[in-house]
Image (tube, rainbow, N blue to C red):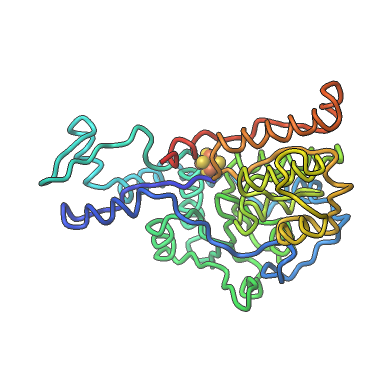
């Protein structure tokens, strides 16, 4: 899911420097729940043989589900443009993408503003408010990690599902309410919970995120373990993991090296040691019942879309090389699969 930056309305030039710094950084993820940690998710429990793919397929075809908006696209986009295009941006554009205020010169980045996935998500949320003016509207998490947008939705009386004692409290949601799923999606147990409550679901999940879910479902079908490049407590990765079969989440190249070193019995760089040590290191980042000696034989790569594309690709190549070394070049296809699920928009916006 994208980190997106859009200039909110600023008073010039007073707030310029500090707000510019704030808005120009990738925002840190908001942690809600991670597998194997004490549950902080919904109350629905998912059996290990639950068919998440079929459930999602059926849910997306049910009458209480919408992911395409409600026919108010033009007017909601217009409203968003008026709310999120600041005087700073206008000024920069009028002056060849560069302007000097006092001793500060600001240049407009080549890629700026919302990526299409974020724009789509926010716009569908605006449409939901217009379509359901009197209904209670909830959202399962921040729609994107952008305080200006989240505050605006709050003002539109779109409420976040409350979190207490490390759990989301879905009992506030009643039949007939509307519940928005944010741009980075929601875990399958949350979808199940909402479906059981007969609410109207407005799903703004970015199609690139759904594409990653399709990928881990393919891994599952082929009995491959998904290596997910992401952060185990990030809501997008929580959602992706909920659609995977066996999985292990690595947050960077060092962790990927550790796993590959384990696969090669310490012959890569000697960073790994025993099975127990691996399980301790990844105790919050593996699927239930994960067994490194059985579950690291067939691997597929997937990613959290906010991770840098270059690093995911590097991790993919490392795993491929590891499997070639372990099982022979001629057998690599039986031990490694990769699909292109990497969205370029994050790279363009967060490559700092
Ligand atoms: S996956 Fe790509 S298009 Fe979708 S929200 Fe993230 S950055 Fe934007």
Residue 339, position as x, y percentages in the image: 70, 31
Residue 48 located left or right of residue 64: right
The image shows residue 85 at horizontal and vertical percentages of: 30, 45
Return the x and y of residue 6 as percentages of the image width and height: 35, 47
Q: Residue furthest left?
A: 102
Left or right of 63, for residue 126: left
Query: Which residue of the protein is positioned furthest toward the top in this rendering?
Result: 330
Query: What is the count of numbered marks?
Result: 0
Image point (59%, 61%), residue name: 179
Quadrant of the rendering where the C terminus is positioned = top left
Residue at the image point whose x is 63% and y is 66% from the top: 176
Q: Is residue 146 left or right of residue 254?
A: left
From this view, report whether residue 326 is shown above or below residue 36.
Answer: above
Name the foreground residue: 82 vs 277. Answer: 277
Q: Nearer the viewer, residue 157 or 8?
A: 8
Q: Quadrant of residue 34?
A: bottom right
Find residue 131 and report its horizontal and vertical position in percent.
50, 55
Q: Residue at x 86, y 58 (%)?
A: 289
Q: Is residue 174 above or below residue 288?
A: below
178 or 233: nearer the viewer = 233
């Amino acid at each position: 899911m994208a980190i997106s930056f859009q200039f909110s309305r600023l008073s010039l030039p007073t707030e310029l420097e500090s707000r510019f710094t704030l808005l120009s950084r990738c925002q840190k993820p908001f942690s809600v729940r991670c597998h194997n940690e004490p549950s902080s998710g919904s109350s629905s429990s998912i059996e290990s043989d639950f068919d998440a793919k079929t459930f999602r397929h059926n849910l997306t075809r049910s009458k209480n589900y919408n992911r395409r908006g409600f026919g108010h696209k033009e007017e909601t986009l217009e409203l968003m443009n008026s709310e999120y295009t600041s005087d700073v941006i206008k000024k920069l554009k009028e002056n060849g993408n560069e302007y000097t205020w006092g001793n500060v010169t600001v240049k407009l980045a080549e890629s700026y503003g919302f990526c299409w996935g974020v724009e789509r998500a926010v716009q569908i949320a605006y449409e939901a408010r217009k379509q359901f003016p009197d209904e209670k509207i909830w959202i399962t998490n921040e729609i994107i990690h952008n305080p200006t947008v989240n505050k605006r939705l709050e003002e539109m009386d779109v409420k976040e599902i409350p979190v207490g004692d490390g759990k989301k409290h879905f009992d506030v949601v009643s039949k007939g309410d509307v519940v928005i799923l944010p741009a980075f999606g929601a875990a399958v147990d949350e979808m199940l919970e909402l479906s059981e409550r007969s609410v109207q679901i407005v799903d703004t999940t970015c199609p690139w995120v759904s594409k990653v879910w399709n990928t881990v479902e393919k891994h599952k079908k082929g009995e491959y373990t998904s290596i997910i490049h992401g952060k185990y407590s990030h809501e997008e990765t929580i959602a992706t993991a909920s659609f995977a079969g066996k999985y292990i989440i690595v947050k960077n190249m060092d962790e990927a090296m550790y796993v590959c070193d384990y696969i090669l019995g310490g012959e890569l760089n000697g960073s790994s040691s025993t099975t127990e040590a691996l399980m301790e290191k990844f105790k919050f980042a593996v699927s239930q019942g994960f067994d490194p000696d059985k579950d690291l034989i067939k691997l597929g790569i997937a990613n959290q879309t906010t991770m840098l594309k270059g690093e995911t690709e590097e991790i993919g190549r490392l795993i491929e090389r590891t499997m070639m070394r372990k099982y022979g070049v001629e057998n690599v296809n039986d031990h490694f699969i990769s699909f292109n699920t990497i969205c370029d928009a994050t790279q363009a916006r967060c490559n700092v």
